[in-house]
Image: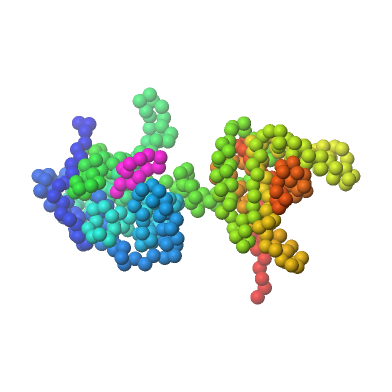
Amino acid sequence: MNEIQIVGLKQIPLIKKGDDIAKIILEALKKNNLKLMNGDIFVIAQTIITKSNGRIRNLKEIIPSLRAIELHEKISSKAKNLGVPEKTPELIQLILDESKDILKVEHVLITETKHGFICANAGIDKSNIEGKENVGLLPSNPDEDAKNIRINLKSLTNKDVAIIISDSFGRPFRVGAVGVALGVSGIIPILDKRGKRDLFDYELHSTIIGHVDSLASAAQLVMGEADEGIPIVLIRGYDFELTENTSIKSLLREKKIDLFRVGTSENTKGILKNRRSYKFGFDSKNIDKKIIENCIELARWAPSAHNGQHWRYVILSKGSLRNRLIDKINEKLRFDLEKDGRVESFIRNKINKTRMNFLEAPFLILLCLDSKDLEKYPDEDRSQNEFILGIQSVSCSAIYLLIAFEVEKLAACWYCAPLFTKEIIKEVLKLPESYIPMAFFTVGYPLKPVKAPPRKNLNDIIFKLKE
C-alpha cells in the first residue's frame, strides 16, 4: 500500500532539564493507544531537546559586548521601519555566541551557526519557552541527541526506528517557515538519485532528494507553531533503509558551491581574487543606472583621512557630451606624443587602444578629488602630505567601487587618463574649481573572462625586519 501515516502524539508533558525523551515517547504511545513498530520514524521538535538539555538562557544574565551594542543600533531602526520586534543587545550577544559567521545584517541577523546551519538569529527562539526573559538555543549536537534517543528506544523495546530532530526555518525568496531536519539517526539525510532512470528512461544527472527535510515538513503540519502542544510526531509507512552511522552534515551544502551566500568570508575571498581589469568590448545588455548609483553608495563607505570623504563621482552615459570629452582628451594625448617625437603609427595605436572602450562602455565613471575638503596648512610640506592623504582616500573609494561592481557581476577597468587632462575634463564637464579629476572607470557586462595575471610570491612583498 502506497501511503504513510502522520500521527501527532498528544499528552506530551512539559519537558524539564534531564528528562528522558525515549521514555516519554513510549509513555505517549501508550496514552495514544499505539505500539512501537520497526521502521517507525519519530520527528521531534528541537524545543523539547533544548529543554531536556538545559539549553535555556535568561537574557537578564547576558552582558552584551560592544559589537552586540553596535549591531543593535544598526538593526533597531530597520526593525522599527518594518514594524517588527526589536532585538535587545542581550539577545544579539547570544546570537553572536551561537554563530560561526554573520552573513547578513538587516532587521534580523542571518547567521551560520556552529553546526553549519544558515538561519535567522542562530535559531534562538522564544516560542514555547517558559519565562518572560528566557530563550531557547539550538541543541549543541542534534545528531548525538537523535542517536541517544534511538539507542534508548532500541534498548527498551528491541525495535529499530529512526529519529529526526526538527525545527522550522524561513527560506530564501519565499514567505513562511517550513520544517527542516537538524539532527538524524537511523536514516540517511539525502537520497542520491543520480544515475537512476526517470519515467521516460532518461538518466538523472543532478537529482538529490533531501527526504529528511521533507519528513520534517510533513510532521510540521501536525506539530504546528502555536498552542497545538504536539512536539513529537510519528511517521509510519515511509520506506527507508535503516542506517546506523548518519549525520545531518551530509545535507549541508559546501560553501564553494553555495550560490546563495553573499558576503561570507569565502565569497569575499573569491571576489577579491577573481576581480580583473576588463579592457575588452562590453555586452549590449542594458544596465540600470540605479545599479551604478548603488555601487557608488557602497564606495562612499571607504576609509578616508580625517573622515574627509574627499571623493566625488560623475556618471557619464553614452552620448554627445562623452564623445566631445573623449575627443578633447585624445587631442591632448596626440599633442603630447607628437611633442615626445613619437611616430604616427605609435600615436594612432595609443589613441585607439582606449578610445573605443571610453566611448562604447555602457557607463564611464569619473572620479575626482574635492580639494576643498583637504585640511589647510601654512607650510608646503604638510600641504603636500595632506594632498597625498586625499589621493589615498580617493583610491580607497575606487577600490570599494571596483569590488561593488564585481559583486553586481559587472566588469570594470580603472584608467588614470584624467591625471593628464585635468583642465580639459573640468572645462568640458563644467566641474567645480575644487574638483581634481583622478580616474576613469569603464563599466558594463563582460563579453568574455579575463585571464588572471601572475602575482608576486608572498615572500617577495613582505619585508622581514632583522632583529
Residue 74 position within the rendered picture, expressed as x and y whole percent measured from the top left? 45, 56
The residue positioned farthest toward the top in the image shown: 200
Residue 337 position within the rendered picture, expressed as x and y whole percent measured from the top left? 85, 44
Residue 184 position within the rendered picture, expressed as x and y whole percent measured from the top left? 29, 49
Residue shown at 40%/40% (left/top)?
Answer: 173
Residue shown at 55%/52% (left/top)?
Answer: 269
Q: In the picture, which quadrant includes the N terminus?
A: top left
* Dominant secondary-structure state across the stretch colored magenta: strand
The tally of labels here is 0
Q: Is residue 99 above or below residue 284?
A: below
Residue shown at 29%/57% (left/top)?
Answer: 136
Is residue 130 rendered magenta in the image?
A: no
Is residue 176 rendered magenta in the image?
A: yes
The residue positioned farthest toward the bottom in the image shown: 467
Residue 250 position within the rendered picture, expressed as x and y whole percent measured from the top left? 38, 47
> Would residue 457 be visible to someone looking at this image?
no
Quarter occupied by residue 53: bottom left
> Would residue 88 be visible to someone looking at this image?
yes
Magenta range is 167-178
Q: In the picture, which quadrant includes the C terminus?
A: bottom right
Name the one closer to the observer, 38 or 448: 448
Residue shown at 58%/36% (left/top)?
Answer: 287
Q: Is residue 289 above or below residue 56?
A: above
Structure colour scheme: rainbow
